[in-house]
Image (tube, helix red, strand yellow):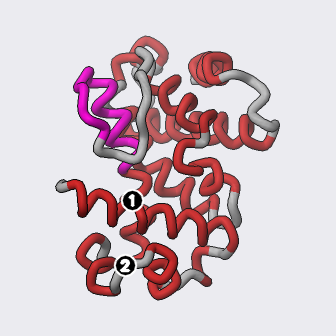
């Protein structure tokens, strides 16, 4: 993606996050997003077909960055996030959440958090699939793979919810350890 398209896309993301901070998802219109982002309607639709696609894309940005870092691919960080990635993808995720990169915690703690957490959990399943070997020794062979995958994703999501509700007092390393102990 060229620099101009990336800049426009990021402006749309930022406008959307700011609106989600103040309004419920259902109250936000594409018109409000484009006004706040200072882009045209055609420009918005060139990037996203719908408001729902915008939300999904925001989740994918986070996970694309984490996947690339986990694969050891050094990029110019064309995504919204920038960091030095640790070995654990789950620690990496908690570190971004701790830093509140691009106000991702706003999305997780706003009125729309169930919607965002739903997409978050979908993307998390893909992340876990790519890291199943980390959990293979913990899985009872009688459990179906799909059940186990959902269990890990739910455990991570609930660990995250607990951490947020308790004021993020634990550092990312500790909360990651809690997560691994729970699965």
Does the residue at mark 1 contact the one at mark 2 (Cβ under 8 Å)?
no
Q: Which residue is mark 2?
A: 39
Q: Residue furthest top?
A: 137
Neighbour class for label 1 at 10 Å: few (<14), some, many (≥20)?
Answer: some
Please check the rendered image and state whether residue 67 is part of the magenta-colored stretch, yes or no. Answer: yes
Residue 97, quarter of the rendered image: top right
Closer to the camera, 37 or 143? Answer: 37
| Residue drawn at (51%, 77%) of the image | 36
**Vertical placement of residue 24 versus 30, above or below:** above
Q: CA distance from mark 1 to mark 2?
A: 11 Å
* Residue 44, image x, y percentages: 33, 77
Q: Which residues are magenta?
A: 61-77
Tell whether 73 sits left or right of 106: left
| Residue drawn at (43%, 50%) of the image | 122
* Residue 63, image x, y percentages: 38, 42
Asked which secondary structure carries label 2, the reply is: loop
| Residue drawn at (63%, 34%) of the image | 98
State the quadrant of the C terminus: top right
């Amino acid at each position: 993606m060229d620099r101009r398209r990336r800049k426009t896309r990021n402006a749309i993301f930022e406008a959307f996050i700011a609106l989600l901070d103040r309004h419920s998802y259902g109250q936000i219109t594409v018109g409000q997003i484009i006004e706040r982002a200072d882009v045209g309607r055609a420009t918005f639709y060139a990037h996203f077909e719908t408001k729902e696609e915008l939300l999904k894309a925001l989740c994918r940005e986070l996970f694309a960055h984490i996947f690339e870092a986990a694969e050891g691919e050094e990029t110019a960080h064309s995504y919204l996030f920038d960091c030095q990635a640790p070995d654990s993808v789950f620690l990496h995720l908690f570190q971004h959440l701790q830093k509140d990169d691009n106000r991702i915690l706003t999305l997780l703690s706003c009125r729309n958090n169930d919607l965002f957490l739903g997409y978050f959990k979908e993307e998390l399943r893909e992340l876990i699939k790519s890291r199943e070997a980390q959990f293979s020794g913990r899985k009872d062979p009688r459990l179906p793979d799909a059940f186990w995958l959902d269990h890990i994703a739910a455990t991570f999501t609930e660990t995250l919810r607990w951490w947020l509700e308790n004021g993020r007092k634990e550092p990312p390393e500790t909360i990651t350890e809690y997560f691994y102990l729970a699965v």
